[in-house]
Image (spheres, helix red, strand yellow):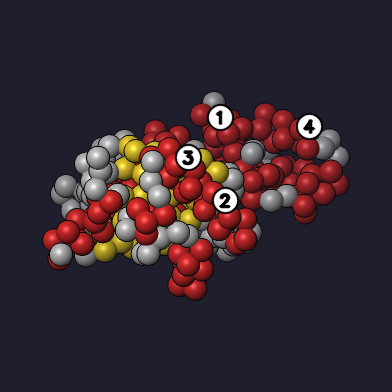
Amino acid sequence: MTSVSEIVIGIDGGGTGCRVSIVDADGRVLGAARGGAANFTSDPVSTKRNITLAVHEAAAKAGLGSDDLMRASVHAGVAGVLSTSDAEAIAHALPFHSCTVTDDQVTTVAGALGGRTGVVISIGTGSFVAFATNEGTRFIGGWGLQLGDQASGAWLGRAALQRCALAQDGLVEPSDLTNRLMSRLGPKPRDVIAFARNASASDFAALAPDVLDAADAGDINGRHVVQDALAYLEVCLDRISLAKDDIICLTGGLGPRFAAWLRPRTQAEIVPPAGTALDGAIWLAREKYKEWKCNS
């Protein structure tokens, strides 16, 4: 039987749902569960409720009671955590004596690198670049579409619609991509304007696969958008001094698609991510457990 002092819990919370995994100190899964959306900025009440329900479901599968959970080593990476007060609000709502809460960027990096040093380029609906060293982690980006998120799915989709507007005005040559997007969202310019006015980041991001497919096929406007995205990513990498053994991981739903477009010396450093954001939460919780064990 697993000692309660060996219980390690990782939590990954995002806009599409949350995941909880309970493992022992050796990494053996004791119980796991999925729950509803968990973005603290979008809906703090539902975030706390959905994570709590998933925790109790995973605990029931693991045969753990409330006293066991109180003694567990826990790390939760939750989307939309923007401040210490956000993290504390989540931690206080969960059934643990001690729970470290961060945003999901931290757990994404930990999961991708798995304790190694290097760079994580995360590209999904949003985007960020992180550089992890033995001294700490530096984050670039993650500002949201209104202020940044360059190269993200939302940014790609919006940039493609900007190319559509330029093509409609006769300032750039139209292409299969711009014609297809106009037909999909239009056909009249006012229809595209109405879409853009009401579109969320996810709505823009839904166009990103078409943009990347078009760029791969040599579409002039698709390539223009992707080249602008690459220019941003390369600037980020140029601000980072990689050591000899540092690696680069591309994560997120769209990250791996950029591998073939990056410059050769960057491609040479790319390796597959070691794991997911949930794996990162577990890894950080296990590191917390190891530290506790060494100090006890």
Identify the secondary structure beneath mark 1: helix
- Tag count: 4
Disc 1 or disc 2, which is closer to the eye?
2
Whole-percent x and y of residue 98? 36, 64
Which circle marks residue 213 in the picture? 1
Distance Cα–Cα, label 2 vs label 3 = 11 Å
Whole-percent x and y of residue 258? 43, 38
User: Of label 1 and label 3, which has the lower sequence position?
Assistant: 3
Res 239 seen here: no
Q: Disc 2 marks which residue?
A: 50
User: Of label 1 and label 2, which has the lower sequence position?
Assistant: 2
Q: Disc 3 marks which residue?
A: 33
- Image quarter in which the N terminus is found: top left
Distance Cα–Cα, label 4 vs label 3 = 42 Å
Decide: is 163 above or below 177: below
User: Of label 2 and label 3, which has the lower sequence position?
Assistant: 3
Whole-percent x and y of residue 243? 18, 53
Which circle marks residue 277 in the picture? none
Q: Amino acid at mark 1?
A: Asp
Q: Residue at x 25, y 43 (%)?
A: 2
Q: Disc 4 marks which residue?
A: 183
User: Of label 1 and label 4, which has the lower sequence position?
Assistant: 4
Distance Cα–Cα, label 2 vs label 4 = 39 Å
Distance Cα–Cα, label 1 vs label 3 = 35 Å
Decide: is 32 above or below 131: above
User: Of label 2 and label 4, which has the lower sequence position?
Assistant: 2
Determine the image quadrant of residue 176.
top right
